[in-house]
Amino acid sequence: MKVMKFGGTSVGKPQRMVDVATLITADNEPKIVVLSAVSGTTNALVEIGASLASGNRDEARKRIDALEVQYRSFVQELLQTEQGRAKGDAILQEHFEFLTIILRISYSEALSKDILAQGELLSTKLFSAYLEEKGIRHSLLPALDFMRIDSNDEPQVEVIREHLSRLIGQHAGVSLFITQGFICRNAKGEVDNLRRGGSDYSASLIGAAVNATVCEIWTDISGMHNNDPRVVDRTMPIEQLSFDEAAELAYFGAKILHPASIWPAQQYNTPVKLLNTMEPQAKGTLISEASVAKGVKAIAAKDRITAIKIKSSRMLLAYGFLRKVFEVFEKYRTPIDMITTSEVAVSVTIDNDSALSEIMTELEVFGTVDVDANQTIICIVGNEIASEPATLQHIFESLQGIEVRMVSYGGSVHNISLLVAGDKKVSVLQQLNRGLFKL
Ligand code: ADP
Ligand code: ASP
Ligand code: MG
């Protein structure tokens, strides 16, 4: 069994859905196809939720109407037979009726999750209608019937495995399954999701749950590039990455993969391939246990980072100080990304600043606390790069004129991270591209 996940742009137009149908029927291997929402839909649903949250029902209605117009023409173009179009219209009827009903009920966090789920429900049902029109045998597996997260929002792979094998078992003789990425049910049984970009995570969780031979992530670029192609002109695809390298890049900002999407693949040893729907013959990137070439492979950047420095002379020669500092972050369930220490100060970075003021109040008991918002972590990844003296030299030579706020070196031999002011991100990425890759 293999898993094939197609992102928003890969299903973003009727013709793209037709191309996806060709890709998934190219061989007879049993597969689970995971689809994102049509590109732009989740953003539109977020805006509808925001309009409702602020009590602006007229604006919400206008946004819903605009989305419906877009989907009506999508159906006309995707489906050709009278029967197919009737099916497509019925799907739109059901989901836009739901969106109309929400205009009349009071807004809540749970309702906003229901709204967001409409994107993946629509894309998979319309795609299924297309496959049906073409006579391609398949079954739709509702993600809400098997994808589960616990009360800490952690996916429950073994529960997912049980539900999925039961569901698949109900469709004897079927070897093509279609399901929604992103959406799941939480510990309370409510509709929830795996956060933005979460369809990659759905795919790797499904891959782990069914012991897939491979988890293919099909998107709009031919694999993981050595640098962020959105801000750096000359970037190139990487043929092979280890799970560790890919996980660091995903966590530290390479948008092509959801930050958490590598651990299920690594834990259950499922190779992951990053492929391009628009250029299916391109090699893409293979992510597996093996780390092949040594040296720097890629650079990624994570924005909106907050740096916190706690300075206290009480830290001098004291033990137990760091524990007390870390306990404050633990209490507020706020993960720390980077840490540097000196004898009298410790600096840490966080990307979730929702409990910042409470954290600061507690840290101020220990000493002086300075906070810098809008920082960026630049993460340089490669096999054993921290053990190559020349790499460090090239990095610092490339950074002329840039003030580096923190450096994390030696925590892992595969990663060197730097903290710089957010407005320096683009120049740092470009300068490192020239210095480390000669691009
Ligand atoms: P999908 O909708 O298929 O999930 P995404 O937009 O989430 O696609 O991810 C693909 C995009 O990630 C690319 O179009 C590219 O702009 C961006 N991206 C950011 N960093 C990288 C990188 N290092 N390598 C490849 N793509 C990257
Ligand atoms: N549709 C969701 C989003 O836009 C999930 C995904 O595309 O991966 O975030
Ligand atoms: Mg994505």
Image (cartoon, rainbow, N blue to C red):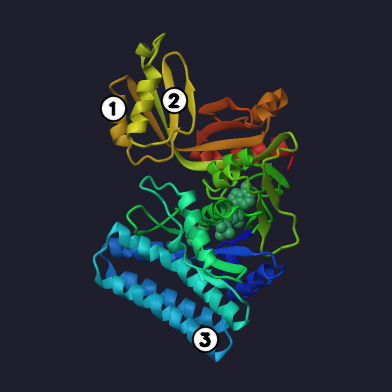
Q: Which label is found at residue 362?
A: 1
Give the residue pinned by disc 2. 347
Kind of residue at badge 2: Ser
Mark 1 → mark 3, Cα distance in angstroms: 60 Å
**Residue 24 percent across, percent down from the top left:** 66, 68
Q: Nearer the viewer, mark 2 or mark 3?
A: 3
Q: Nearer the viewer, mark 1 or mark 2?
A: 1
Residue extending farthest top: 317
Helix, strand or loop for disc 1: helix
Q: Nearer the viewer, residue 424 or 153?
A: 153
Sequence order check: which comes first, mark 1 or mark 2? Answer: 2
| Image-based side of 259 in relation to 26, left or right | left
Helix, strand or loop for disc 2: strand
Q: Is the C-beta separation of discs 1 and 3 under 8 Å?
A: no
Residue 96: quadrant of the picture: bottom left
Is the residue marked by circle 3 packed among few (<14), some (14-19), or many (20+) residues within 10 Å? Answer: many
**Residue 38 percent across, percent down from the top left:** 52, 68
Give the residue pinned by disc 3. 85
Residue 134: quadrant of the picture: bottom right
Q: Is the C-beta separation of discs 1 and 2 under 8 Å?
A: no
Task: Tell me the quarter of the image containing the C terminus.
Answer: top right
Kind of residue at badge 1: Glu
Sequence order check: which comes first, mark 1 or mark 3? Answer: 3
Q: Residue at x 70, y 68 (%)?
A: 28
